[in-house]
Amino acid sequence: MLFSPFPPHCTLDLEWLSKVRVNTQAVLRRAQCIQGLKIPTKQWQAAWLLKAVTCIDLTTLAGDDTPCNVHRLCMKASQPVQYELLKEMDMHDKGVTTAAVCVYPSRVADAVQSLKAANSNLPVASVATGFPAGQTPLESRLTEVRMAVADGATEIDIVINRTLALTGQWEAMYDEICQFREACGDAHLKAILAVGELGTFANVYKASLVAMMAGSDFIKTSTGKESVNATYPVAIVMGRAIRDYFLRTGHKVGFKPAGGIRTAKESLVWLLLIKEELGNDWLSPQLFRLGASSLLADIERQIYHHVTGQYAAYHELPMA
């Protein structure tokens, strides 16, 4: 079993929320420090890049998604790096795949069918709850979750109601996420905070805590549709919330940055940030995901360079 069963709901701790303070300058300095860390090189870089591949939720969330391009996405997720490149690295038999594929609810059945036909047990994740704005009626959002699960999604990325966070209605936000948790059943729940729309680091920290208290298995930075998506300062705030929650409850919650992560170098910085802030236990797809659509192409290009000493043109590394 890839994921352990979700824990029982915690009681919403409003006293904890009331005491939240975030030192903005300290957060910015720490983010600068993380970005200045030395990036691994040579074979160590290649190993870290393969680690990054295994943590990617390979995503397509476009208005023109079709069964055909979802099928191609699934095939690429099942074989994310060319077999010949993996063979040169003696990694061809190690089962290197992405962590999951992520699609709209209407495309879940297509993804499940494609993966089943390929004898792949990759998880199918789906965004839900009125993605990306989360402004549809609650019953519609709950129905969307149930439909995606019924079609075979084993992971659901829900969006929080930003209005509730911005106006400090933490009890109402907690209650909504608890209902999403229940609607998910056995499916994994990732709560998208849309940090670019929360205004302050304190709101980000509080929203992170509320999502975890309500039973979220992961907290995720962004939908990828906001003007500001995953940033290192926000990741530090969310990471500290995850760490504080673990120290208080003993329960490990995963972290997923998403939106604007496009280069292999960026993926390495994200892995270093997680290692520094949360430790090695979080360096696995069970507790860390990278939400991305174009990142994989650049990682495969860097691995191609590691193996051959040359850079491939992007058309030489097709989606599938």
Image (tube, rainbow, N blue to C red):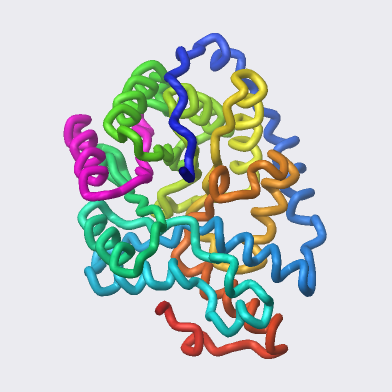
Q: Quadrant of the C terminus?
A: bottom left
Residue at x 63% of width, y 66% of height: 50
Residue at x 46% of width, y 43% of height: 1
Q: Is residue 130 left or right of residue 77?
A: left
In the picture shown, does residue 174 fall above or below 91? above
Counting labels gives 0
| Location of residue 58 by image quarter | bottom left
| Location of residue 135 by image quarter | top left
User: Can you give x and y, in whole percent of width and height, for residue 44 in the image?
Assistant: 77, 67
Q: Nearer the viewer, residue 130 or 195?
A: 130
Q: In this orientation, does residue 196 appear?
A: no
Residue at x 55% of width, y 42% of height: 255
Q: Which residues are magenta?
A: 137-163
In the picture shown, does residue 146 fall above or below 320? above
User: Can you give x and y, in whole percent of width and height, for residue 213 in the image?
Assistant: 48, 22
User: Can you give x and y, in whole percent of width and height, for residue 137 in the image?
Assistant: 19, 33
Q: Is residue 250 left or right of residue 119?
A: right
Magenta-span inclusion, residue 149: yes
User: Can you give x and y, in whole percent of width and height, for residue 178 in the image?
Assistant: 35, 24
Q: Nearer the viewer, residue 133 or 246?
A: 246
| Location of residue 246 by image quarter | top right
Residue at x 60% of width, y 60% of height: 52
Q: Nearer the viewer, residue 104 or 193?
A: 104
Q: In this orientation, does residue 235 appear?
A: yes
Magenta-span inclusion, residue 111: no
